Amino acid sequence: MKSDNRKRIYGLGNRLWHTDASFQDPPGRYSMLSAKVVPPVDADTEFADMRAAYDALSEPERARLEGLRVHHSIAYSRQTLGFEFSENEQEALKGAVHPLVRTIPRSGRRSLYLASHASRIIDWPVPEGRLLLRELIEHATQPRFVYRHQWRVGDLVIWDNRATMHRARPFDDARYRRELRRVTTLDVEQPAAVTTGV
């Protein structure tokens, strides 16, 4: 695509650390990304473990985050890159509110839940909230928490959005084509199975 193509400019937002569909309610749970076309240059994807990032916080830091809620908006994350939305688009993209710290069902592990879509902390002054969100993203993306995947055709990567941030690494997309196909499931609990006696 040409450098000024609107779809390409929108897609550049995937180079920001993000969590799929956190701007929806219910948000995304699992994502699957399949490599169909891979360029002959590095066009990797990085993943940050938000459980390990939470575990590495001090007890006072964890206590400070308890009970905080965050507004997530894809319009916010794209606008930080200069992408402009029409009035109708903005109306359709109001976002969603989620806890800053989530407990993953079954494992019981705690995880930070934020990324570039996190626009503000509810009931906090916007500047202070955004500073805290930036600090936490910087903390969570230290090399010790990050895995970098080098794509090969046919690769399939599956991750849990409740405990992971990810981002695409930049490459010369005006020269090389990369085609990855993604599916994301929603974070909806399934009803318990019902068994009947025979």
Image (cartoon, grey):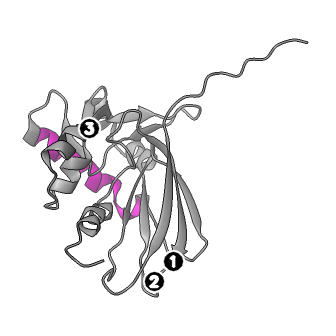
Q: Position of residue 32 (x, y in %)?
A: 54, 56
The numbered dot on residue 37 is 1
Is residue 134 something that shows in the picture? no
* Residue 159 image label: none
Q: Is residue 146 magenta?
A: no
The tag earlier along the polypeptide, 3 or 2, is 2
| Residue at which label 3 appears | 95
Residue 55 in percent (x, y) is at 42, 43
Element type where label 2 sits in the image: loop
Q: Of all residues shown, which one is farthest toward the top? A: 197
Residue 138 sits inside the magenta stretch:
yes
- Does residue 6 sit above or below 100 in this rendering? below
Q: Quadrant of residue 26?
A: top left
Q: Position of residue 79 (x, y in %)?
A: 16, 54
Q: Amino acid at mark 3?
A: Gly
At a point 28% along the width and 65% down the height, the residue shown is 7
Magenta extent: 128-144
Residue 152 in the image: above or below residue 164? below
Q: Is disc 3 placed on a helix, strand or loop?
A: loop
Identify the mark nearer the N-term, 3 or 1. 1
Instruction: Indicate left or right for 58 with 104 as reference.
Output: left
Please name the predominant secondary structure of the magenta segment in the image. helix
Q: Quadrant of residue 98?
A: top left
Q: Position of residue 141 (x, y in %)?
A: 34, 58
Report the front residue among 85 and 43: 85
* Mark 3 Cα shell of 10 Å, populated few (<14), some (14-19), many (≥20): many
Q: Nearer the viewer, residue 89 or 168?
A: 89
Q: Which residue is mark 2?
A: 39
Q: Amino acid at mark 1?
A: Val
